[in-house]
Amino acid sequence: MAQTATSTNPTQALAPSNPISHAANNATTAMHGLPHALTTLILIAAALLAAAIIHFVLVHAVPGPLLKRRPVLAILVKRTRRILFLVLAVVLLGTVLPEAPMAASTLSRVLHVLSAGFIVLLGWSLMVAVDTFTVYKLSLRPDNIQADVMARKHVTQWQVLRRASHVLILMITVAAALMVFPAVRQYGVSLLASAGAAGLVVGLAARPVLSNLIAGIQIAITQPLRVEDAVVINGQWGWIEEITSTYVVVRIWNWQRMIVPLAWLLEQPFQNWTRDSSELIGTVHWNVDYTIPVDELRKKLDEIVHSTPLWSGKVVVLQVTHALATTIELRALVSARNSGEAWDLRCYVREKMIDYLQATHPGALPKQRLELEGQPIPDHPAAVEPIHEDA
């Protein structure tokens, strides 16, 4: 009979230990005359072979029609095949190795490694499941995400929650795996129970990570910004390209990327142009002469916006907003479906209106007037005698 270790083995608790352990014990007894190393190798090979057979049966036990009706289940089965085999192998090894002819100290170390591996595989399985479900949900989003506020909301929630879940699962998995080993478990308990300098240093080091993680969860729930929202942060205008568990990536109009920590973002004010709707109203300004016929320009503005698909068809207004000393200021309001089209529409309207003024009302462009009182106005500027200043 092989010597067994007294340490707790989670793999034995989850496995059907009685029949398998009994079979392993009988096999060890039958191989009594063989070297201990060879007996152990035979038991390991038998456990791996049994894991492969069970894995094959389980993978092919799921009916094909069910996988076709449930695409997320098909993706999950495909992604977890390798993990399932590793889990079965660890469980069976943890069940048969206590019957192997090896020293108790060696067996204890092996079981600790298998227990830690089992915990890591469980954490890996959870992360794969979260990834699979998130990818499936994101695949259902519409193609034109910029025009759909609800789609941007769901994309943001799933992306942030996926990354936050990864961080939490990773932290719990690593902590649980390390606590399997007695030396690490004792150190962890003493570290958590102590209020000394070491605990203070660890707490201060973990504070930025935890604050950003909490900020990410808060953004996913409260939705102050979403993926593809048009925002102005620190005077920089751009779109939210990606939201991770610790920072936000802003795609600026010149294709540069600005990285903003989540904790900082929630503590500082910023502008979100598309929080409730992707539609925007763009403004265009001109300074023109007092002689300009404003009603005629209103008709021309209406004609310009109707000539481009950039206009959403809702708002087109021309107003005189300022009367300055030499010019008046005109402001046009035009609506677009999203921030990118609003920018292009503003540039288009500005360009076409300048072309119209140059072609039909060149005298209405801004100019400086000079009025000479009490003197006849010459027919040609060259007739004006130059003014000579004394040296």
Image (spheres, grey):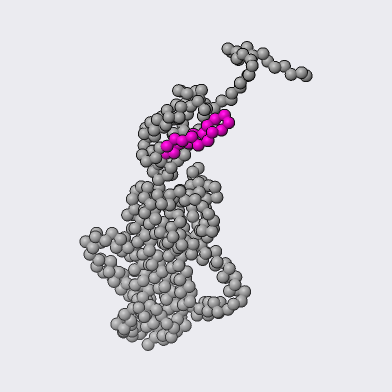
Compared with 344, 79 (above or below) is below
Which residue is depicted at the point 38% across and 61% down?
Answer: 131
Which residue is depicted at the point 51% across and 23% down?
Answer: 363
Which residues are drawn in magenta?
317-334
Which residue is depicted at the point 38% across and 52% down?
Answer: 149
In percent of width and height, residue 12 lies at 37, 80
Compared with 277, 284 (above or below) is above
Q: Which residue lies most toward the right here?
A: 391
Compared with 361, 71 (above or below) is below
In percent of width and height, residue 365 lies at 52, 26
Number of marks in picture: 0
In percent of width and height, residue 312 lies at 37, 40
Q: Is residue 322 magenta?
A: yes
Q: Is residue 324 magenta?
A: yes
**Magenta stretch prevailing secondary structure:** strand
**Quarter of the image that includes the N terminus:** bottom left
- 218, 129: nearer the viewer: 218
In percent of width and height, residue 117 lies at 42, 72
Q: Quadrant of residue 104?
A: bottom left
**Quarter of the image that includes the C terminus:** top right
Q: Is residue 248 visible?
A: yes
- Compared across the picture, whether 223 is left or right of 202 comes to left
